[in-house]
Image: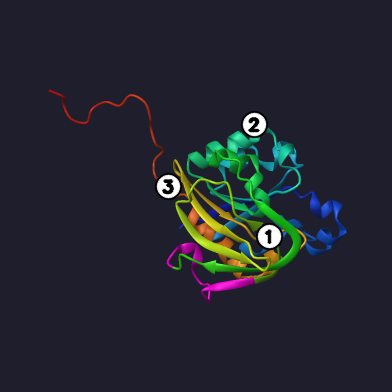
Amino acid sequence: MAKIRVTVWNEYRHEKRSEVVGDLYPEGIHGAIAGFLGTDADLEVTTATLDEPEHGLTDDVLAATDVLVWWGHMAHHDLSDEVAEKVVKRVWNGMGFIALHSAHFSKVFKRLMGTTCDLKWRGQGEKERVWVVEPSHPIAANLEKDYFEIPLEEMYGERFDIPAPDEIVFMSWFAGGNVFRSGCCYRRNQGKIFYFQPGHETFPTFFQKEVQTVIHNAVYWAAPNNRPQLTFGFHEPLEPIE
């Protein structure tokens, strides 16, 4: 079986500008995510960052990507509209897209959702309890309990201005009292999209086993099914029309 080709994309700005974030993620958030995904021999994992030529997402890179994992926060506006549109079209044509944490405000995710994707937030850090509300879903595989807890995380709260998800896999409760649809699945044309809320840059969220399990599962769920490309427009009849 061919390997699933995964590209982990990250702005890689916070790590360079904040000593706290740089110490926490010395290889960058993309490096941390690629590190645990790369332990799976069936995944071929590479990385790309915002300040590379074409933001690291050349036509060749996108053509060789089955699943794109995306982390962004402070520099959504610095991504060119041209590259964002290329990513969206690749998703329509079957590439999986996993949006992590503040990627809800990325140009790509907002374009795919067609809404503001705005929400409530609170950044001082508080306990998050992530409830598994769809335990039979493949993205929830190998989680040991009905929920898991993240000791410190940025609060995201409803209303989350997204279209109704095709599936909600996780719902989160925060110590301050807010709740949030923290694991949402979508299908757009032939592509599958998963939004996962945990992952603020000042907390070690991506080193937590359960978070790694969810992202790993999501890669397999979002991978293309290799069906032929869809065709549109005029179509000849399959049978004679009398």
Q: Is residue 145 magenta?
A: yes
Q: What residue is disc 1 on?
A: 155
In the rendered image, the vertical position of residue 100 relative to residue 113, given as above or below: below
Q: Residues within 10 Å of mark 2 (few under 14, many from 20)?
A: few
Identify which amino acid the numbered label 2 is placed on: Glu
Q: Position of residue 214 (x, y in %)?
A: 56, 64
In the rendered image, the vertical position of residue 144 relative to residue 168, given as above or below: below
Which of the pair 139/156 is nearer the observer? 156
Kindly indicate the quadrant of the structure image that contains residue 209.
bottom right
Q: Give whichever of discs 3 and 2 has the lower sequence position.
A: 2
Compute the Cα span from label 1 to label 3.
37 Å
In the rendered image, the vertical position of residue 230 relative to residue 206, given as above or below: above
Q: What residue is disc 2 on?
A: 82
Q: What residue is disc 3 on?
A: 226
- The answer, for residue 171, to whether it is visible in the render is yes
Q: Give whichever of discs 1 and 3 has the lower sequence position.
A: 1
